[in-house]
Image: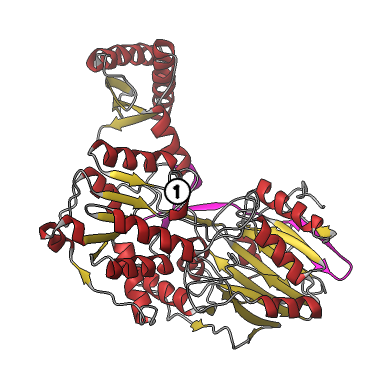
């Protein structure tokens, strides 16, 4: 197994004369989420997915997307962007990519609809060049021939990619699992993958999210049956929390409403958006969808109501959290009602989810989750047995695990070696991976990183760092009234936020600090009293005072206010 490179960042970006295929992870390597890859051959580059991740810290950051420095360096070679499926960690960064590059986008129908919806929320762009891909219709982008294969995942129209190049065939699985008895009509493409293996696959790039989990992910049919049983047995109102994009799960809940003679209510913008798009694409044609408004639900017999809610990760303003706080105008829950979390906890969100559960349980509302009832949720990602089965089908010459932390990637590479794939590599974001018939190697490094977005605008890294420090340390300000002509200090005023504890007399502390800073400024010689020097001394003096007095220092700002 080849390990991730420790090479320093290099400028290996021009591969126009290189007959090897080059793959660069800009996100999704050594992390879960923010998936984005560049695949190049000669003077052509294909981008695969362009996703975001979310901050677990409350810093006013909406989303985080990959840095595009590498793409800027090879911008003349970019021929298009291909999307595997419509989850945010695969499509959420597209608006920010298109601010830099005018490229056509090829996406499955459901992802295409979500991308169009997303652009309505952003400032005007040039008209989108957005093409819906069809699994039975290969297409070409530059020197690449793309075939999309339907795979099972927790969103409609999830696809794997077969990328044909003059240097060999790549298979990119996207996010996938294998269901042998799926609820929907989509069968896993085992026969086509076996054919590709027979023909010869140069490189397999495969989802590593569950490489630590034994056996298989489970199937949606079993979740449907478990939800049916729990809803049937529940005495009062039932709320099922799901990811909005999990349309198969929502269809199962819709069918349960019909079977249990309950009225269906959709709570949360995400749920309503995904259901609307699914209906427009004909995904509910075989399922009656009789939806009532939440306020009608208040008037009904509790045993006749079934709601689907967004907010599985404890988001404060989402429907589930508002129900837990009992501040949702449309619906209120009472003791004896049931909440089912048909979802998993994304790492980092556990505390917020526990707080929501606790709020329900304190009010006598029963909470069912997969720790108490494992059958209420199955993962959308392949576990080790499924990952092994896919390796056996494709039998690639080389293997590159993707979509996971270093640990997940390493575990997946070990599995590939157990299955007889001798040439494997564990890479990180920024590694320039070269592959041809002769081998798989890291030929260089490029700069990668994260861009933090606040209200659709990128934040400077220094601003993010300051927000972190403000949250951890608090802030103090010293303002100096300064005589510009006479170079004299006429007064000092100190204020603070988020630093002094409730038991401390804030006014007394501020007065002491003002006296300390004033004494330090008074010691300046006449030739040292220019405004810039006064500002520097005041800043250092306030930090010194607070550090000595409290054993810690907030962020300090000094402001000199001169005569007009």
User: Which residue is at the far right?
Assistant: 438
User: Which residue is at the far bottom?
Assistant: 137
Q: Residue at x 67, y 74 (%)?
A: 45
Provide residue 78's location: percent of width, then percent of height.
Answer: 63, 75
Res 247 → quadrant = bottom left
Question: Does residue 67 appear anywhere in the picture?
Answer: yes
Provide residue 353's location: percent of width, then percent of height.
Answer: 38, 43
Provide residue 56's location: percent of width, then percent of height.
Answer: 45, 44
User: Observer-nearest residue: 557 or 23?
Assistant: 23
Q: Was residue 461 drawn as part of the magenta stretch in this picture?
A: yes
Res 110 → quadrant = bottom left
Q: Which residue is tagged 1?
A: 370
User: Observer-nearest residue: 537 or 137?
Assistant: 137
Q: Is residue 359 above or below residue 44?
A: above
User: Observer-nearest residue: 249 or 208?
Assistant: 249
Q: Is residue 86 left or right of residue 209?
A: left
Q: Is residue 350 left or right of residue 100?
A: left
Q: Is residue 83 above or below residue 52?
A: below
Q: Is residue 41 left or right of residue 542?
A: right
Magenta residues (range): 434-463
């Amino acid at each position: 197994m080849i390990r991730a490179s420790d090479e320093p960042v290099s400028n290996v970006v021009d591969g126009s004369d290189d007959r090897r295929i080059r793959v660069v992870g800009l996100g999704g390597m050594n992390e879960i989420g923010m998936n984005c890859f560049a695949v190049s051959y000669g003077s052509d580059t294909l981008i695969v997915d362009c996703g975001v991740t979310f901050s677990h810290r409350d810093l006013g950051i909406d989303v985080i997307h990959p840095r595009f420095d590498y793409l800027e360096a090879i911008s003349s070679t970019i021929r298009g962007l291909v999307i595997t499926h419509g989850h945010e960690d695969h499509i959420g960064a597209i608006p920010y990519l298109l601010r830099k590059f005018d490229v056509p986008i090829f996406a499955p129908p459901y992802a295409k609809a979500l991308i169009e919806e997303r652009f309505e929320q952003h400032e005007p762009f040039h008209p989108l060049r957005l093409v819906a891909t069809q699994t039975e219709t290969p297409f070409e982008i530059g020197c690449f021939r793309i075939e999309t294969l339907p795979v099972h995942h927790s969103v409609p129209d999830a696809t794997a990619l077969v990328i044909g190049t003059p240097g060999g065939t790549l298979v990119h699985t996207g996010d996938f699992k294998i269901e042998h008895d799926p609820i929907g009509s989509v069968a896993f493409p085992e026969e086509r993958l076996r054919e590709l293996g027979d023909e010869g696959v140069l490189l397999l790039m495969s989802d590593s999210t569950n490489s630590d989990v034994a056996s298989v992910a489970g199937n949606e049919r079993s979740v449907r049956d478990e939800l049916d049983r729990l809803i049937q047995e529940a005495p009062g109102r039932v709320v099922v929390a799901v990811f909005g994009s999990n349309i198969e799960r929502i269809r199962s809940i819709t069918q349960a409403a019909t079977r249990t003679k309950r009225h269906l209510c959709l709570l949360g913008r995400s749920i309503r958006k995904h259901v609307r798009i699914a209906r427009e694409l004909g995904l509910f044609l075989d399922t009656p969808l009789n939806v009532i408004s939440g306020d009608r639900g208040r008037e009904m017999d509790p045993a006749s109501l079934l709601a689907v809610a967004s907010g599985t990760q404890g988001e404060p303003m989402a429907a589930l959290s508002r129900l837990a706080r009992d501040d949702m105008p449309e619906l209120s829950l009472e003791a004896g009602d049931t909440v089912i979390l048909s979802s998993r906890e994304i790492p980092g969100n556990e505390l917020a989810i526990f707080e929501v559960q606790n709020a329900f349980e304190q009010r006598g509302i029963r909470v069912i989750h997969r720790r108490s009832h494992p059958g209420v949720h199955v993962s959308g990602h392949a576990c080790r047995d499924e990952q092994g089965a896919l390796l056996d089908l494709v039998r690639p010459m080389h293997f590159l695990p993707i979509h996971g932390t270093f640990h997940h990637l390493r575990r997946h590479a070990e599995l590939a070696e157990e299955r007889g794939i001798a040439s494997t590599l564990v890479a990180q974001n920024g590694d320039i991976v070269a592959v041809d018939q002769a081998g798989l190697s890291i030929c260089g490094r490029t700069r990668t990183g994260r861009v933090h977005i606040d209200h659709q605008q990128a934040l400077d890294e220094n601003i993010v760092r300051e927000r972190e420090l403000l949250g951890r340390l608090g802030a103090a300000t010293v303002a100096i009234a300064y005589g510009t002509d006479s170079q004299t200090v006429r007064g000092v005023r100190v204020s603070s936020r988020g630093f002094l504890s409730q038991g401390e007399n804030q006014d007394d502390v501020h007065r002491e600090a003002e006296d300390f800073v004033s004494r330090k400024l008074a010691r300046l010689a006449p030739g040292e009293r220019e405004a810039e020097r006064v500002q520097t001394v005041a800043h250092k003096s306030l930090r010194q005072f607070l550090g000595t007095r409290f054993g810690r220092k907030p962020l300090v700002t000094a402001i000199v206010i001169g005569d007009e």
